[in-house]
Image: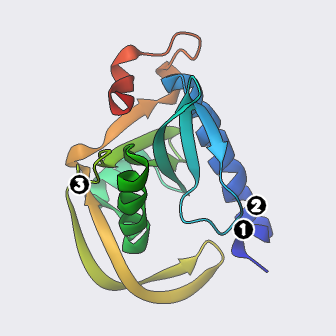
Amino acid sequence: MLDSETEVGRRYIEEEALVAERVGEVFGVTPLSLGSATTHSDRLFSRDGTVVSIVEIKSRNMSLSELENLGSYLLSYHKIDWGIAAAQLLHVPFLLFVSLMKSNHIVYWTIANGEGNIRCNFQVQDTKTQATCNGGVAVRENAYIFLDGMKVLRQAETNLNHPNPALKEWVA
């Protein structure tokens, strides 16, 4: 059984779908699901029939202030490595969106541009972390993505009927 098929996993998959829908409304893009539950990234976003980005979506049971206190966001490095390769192949930016469920924020980073050039600061280390949303322990290569390149969508302040054009720079 995949972790996404457990009760806890389904909760995070549902949140992922909500984030994709929300981001689509804010940025004026259409989220496209990928082939299966085991793909390397979560969505493609398109506009007017053209793919404009590849996206990894995460959900964390933390607030924006808790993330700021940590000073970085942890992501398995293989997600970054694969996303950069996909950005190069598809010639679109690779972005990371994170739902901070305690404070109802979505934060995001442009990880790489359409040429695969890295656009955020991170440090890679082998660390012991929780293996999956269902627990366990894993030692793996993790990226600590610094917050200097992070952007914040304040969900309560975003008017979904009139997306903010300033938020669309990553699809240009």
Residue 19 position in % (x across, y down):
59, 41
How crowded is the residue under tag 3: few (<14 C-alpha within 10 Å), some, or many (20+)? Answer: some
How far is mark 2 from mark 1, CA to CA? Answer: 5 Å
Q: Is residue 154 visible?
A: yes
| Of 90 and 57, the residue lying toward us | 90
Residue linked to disc 1: 4
- Residue 130, position as x, y percentages in the image: 51, 80
What residue is rendered at 26% in x and 80% in y?
125
- Amino acid at pointer 1: Ser
147 with respect to 48 (left or right): left
Q: Mark 3 or mark 1, which is nearer the start of the sequence?
A: 1
Disc 2 and disc 1 in contact, CB within 8 angstroms: yes
User: Which mark is first along the chain, 1 or 2?
Assistant: 1
- Please provide percent x and percent y for residue 45: 54, 38
Q: Residue drawn at (39%, 43%), measured in percent from left and top?
A: 92
Earlier sequence position, callout 3 versus callout 2? 2
> Are circles 1 and 3 on residues that touch, CB within 8 Å?
no
**Label annotation for residue 118:** 3
Could you classify mark 1 by the number of other residues whose Cα lies within 10 Å: few (under 14), some (14-19), or many (20 or more)? some
The answer to which quarter of the image holds residue 35 is: bottom right
Which residue in the structure is indicated by mark 2?
Answer: 10
For numbered disc 1, what is the local secondary structure?
Answer: helix
**Residue 127 is drawn in which quadrant?**
bottom left
**Viewer-closest of 144 and 165:** 165
